[in-house]
Image (spheres, rainbow, N blue to C red):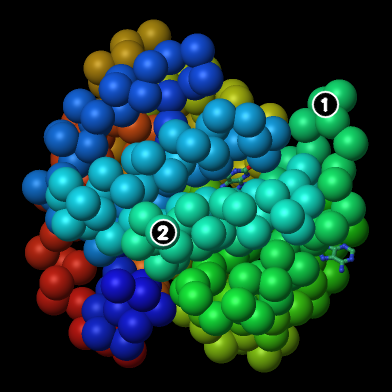
Amino acid sequence: MKIASLFSEKTVFSFEIFPPKKTAPIDTIYSTLEALQDLKPDFISVTFGAGGSGNGENTLAIARRLKERYGITPMAHLPCIHYTRTQIDTILAQFQENGIENVLALRGDRVEGMTPAEDFPHAADLVAYIHSRGEFDIAAACYPECHPEAPNLDTDIRYLKEKVDAGASHLITQLFFDNDIFYDFRYRAARAGIRVPIEAGIMPVTNRKQIERMVTMCGASLPRKFTKMVQRFENNPAALQDAGIAYAIDQIVDLVTDGVDGIHLYTMNNPYVARKISEAVGGILQAAPKC
Ligand code: FAD
C-alpha cells in the first residue's frame, strides 16, 4: 500500500526502527518486530546507514519481513550521498522485487573518510529521480528547528519546497520537544506553498545518555518543563523512563488535538515504550476528526 493515500482518511500513526549494528546478527531485531506487530501502526519505517555496505541489506530484509510476516506496510529509508546512480538503481530494483512501495528519500550525513558520490548531492535530486521512475511513494525529511547545515529556517524551507515539488508526497520531521516550534514550522511551510501532509516525529526520552546524544546530533531545543523533568529523575532510570513516556504522550495529545497529519514515533527499538504510548494515545488517534 502506498502511504500517501492514508492521510486523507485518518491521523496517521507510524513507527521508526533501525537495523542492528553491523557486528550484531539481524535476528536481534526480530523479537522487537514480534513485540511491535500487534500494535498495528499504519506503517513502520526502517533506517538505512548513509555509509552503505551491509546495513542496506538489513533494511531490505527487515522491511520485507514486516510486510510478509506481519502484514505491516514498510517504508525503507534511502540516503543517497554516498551512492552512484547505478547503486541507487540496484537498491530500488531490490525494493521493488520485494514489494516495498514506500521510500523515505534522504541525502544522509557525510561519513568520515568517504567522499560523496556526486550523483545525488541533495535529497531533492533523489526524490526527483525516484519520482521519474514512477514506482514508489516518496517521503522526505524536514527540520522544524532548521537543518544544522542550513543558514536559516527560511532557506531550509525553500529547499524543502524543492523536495515537495520534485515529488515527495509527505514529510516527516526531525524530533522536537517543544510543540510550539512545530506549529511555527508548519505555518512557515504552508506560507512557502508546501501543501503535503507533515508527520510530527516524536522521540520518547528514556535515558540521559540518549538526550545528550540527540541534542548534540540534531540541536533540539529543550523546554524548561523537559530539562526540569530530566534533572529531577536523571539518577532513577525507571522514573526517567516513565516521565519520558508521559512527556511524549502529552506532546502527542496536544498535536492530535491541534489536527496534526500524523505522528511518527522514534521507537529506538524499544517495544515496551512504543506499547505504553500506543495504548495511551490509541483512543484519541481514532477519535480525531480529519481536519
Ligand atoms: P537535504 O534535503 O538534501 O538537506 C540537507 C541540507 O542541504 C540542508 O541544510 C538543506 O537546507 C541543504 N540543501 C538542500 N538542497 C540544497 C540545494 N539545492 N543547495 C544548497 N543547499 C541545499 N540519515 C541516514 O543516514 N539514514 C536514515 O535512515 C535517516 N533517517 C532519517 C529520518 C528522518 C525522519 C530524518 C528527519 C532524518 C533522517 N536521517 C537519516 C538524517 C538525514 O540523512 C540528515 O539529517 C541529513 O543531514 C540531511 O538529509 P536530508 O534528506 O534532509 O537532506
Q: As shown in the figure, which amino acid type bears the numbered disc 2?
A: Glu
Categorize mark 1 by other alpha carbons within 10 Å: few (<14), some (14-19), many (20+): few
Is residue 238 visible in the rendered image? The answer is yes
Residue 128 quadrant? bottom right
Looking at the image, is 228 positioned above or below residue 175?
above
Looking at the image, is 167 positioned above or below residue 247?
below
**Quadrant in the picture for the N terminus:** bottom left
| Tag 1 residue | 112
- Residue placed at 23% from the left, 37% from the top? 33
* Viewer-closest of 28 and 69: 69
Tell me, for residue 97, which label it has, or none. Answer: 2
Is residue 265 visible in the rendered image? The answer is no
Tell me, for residue 100, which label it has, or none. Answer: none
Looking at the image, is 124 positioned above or below residue 40?
below
125 left or right of 262? Answer: right
Percent position of residue 151, x then y: 89, 58
Looking at the image, is 98 positioned above or below residue 212?
below
- Residue placed at 17% from the left, 57% from the top? 71
* Viewer-closest of 165 and 152: 165
- Residue placed at 35% from the left, 40% from the top? 62
78 left or right of 288? Answer: right
**Quadrant in the picture for the C terminus:** bottom left
Q: Nearer the viewer, mark 1 or mark 2?
A: 2
- Residue placed at 88% from the left, 53% from the top? 118
- The secondary element bearing badge 2 is classed as helix
Rendering quadrant holding ligand 1: bottom right
Q: Earlier in the sequence, mark 1 or mark 2?
A: 2
Percent position of residue 170, x then y: 50, 74
Decide if ligand 1 comes within 8 Å of the CB at mark 2.
no
Percent position of residue 171, x then y: 53, 69
Q: As shown in the figure, which amino acid type bears the numbered disc 1?
A: Glu
Residue that extends furthest to the top in the rendered view of this protein = 235
